[in-house]
Amino acid sequence: MNWFESGRFLIIAGAVLIVIGVLFSVADKLPLGRLPGDFSFGSGRFKVYVPIATCILLSVVLTLILNFFSRK
């Protein structure tokens, strides 16, 4: 790996960390986890949370993004 490739990797890694940081800071404002297909069961101290709709939505979005970037 030469210096140019190392520099490019560090720039991309930094950009990814910035995006993850922004997502963490606005995560409370996003409706993910509270969609109408997410189930929560339990009472008292015991709760089971099943985010079915959130998982389907994230799967579709990630599939579209990865297909867009993998096209040649």
Image (cartoon, rainbow, N blue to C red):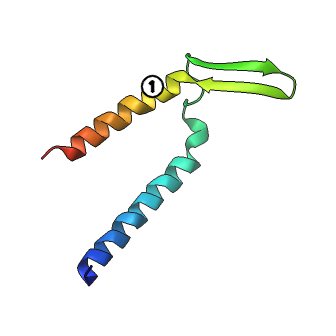
Q: Where is residue 58 in the image (x, y as percent from the top left)?
A: 44, 32
Hey, which residue is sitting farthest left in the picture? 72
Q: Where is residue 7 in the image (x, y as percent from the top left)?
A: 31, 77
On screen, residue 25 versus residue 60, left or right, reads: right
On screen, residue 3 versus residue 60, left or right, reads: left
Q: How crowded is mark 1: few (under 14 residues within 10 Å), some or many (20 or more)?
A: few
Quarter of the picture containing the N terminus is: bottom left
Residue type at tag 1: Ile
Residue plotted at (57% across, 50% down): 25
Residue plotted at (55% across, 29% down): 31
Hey, which residue is sitting farthest bottom in the picture? 3
On screen, residue 17 versus residue 3, left or right, reads: right
Q: Position of residue 39 (x, y in %)?
A: 64, 18
Residue plotted at (44% across, 54% down): 19
Residue indicated by mark 1: 56
The number of discs equals: 1
Q: Is 37 above or below relative to 22? A: above
Write down the quadrant of residue 67 in the picture. top left
Provide the secondary structure element on which disc 1 rests: helix
Q: Is 35 above or below relative to 9? A: above
On screen, residue 17 versus residue 28, left or right, reads: left
Hey, which residue is sitting farthest front in the picture? 1
Q: Nearer the viewer, residue 12 or 47?
A: 47
Write down the quadrant of residue 51 in the picture. top right
Residue plotted at (51% across, 22% down): 53
Write down the quadrant of residue 68 in the picture. top left
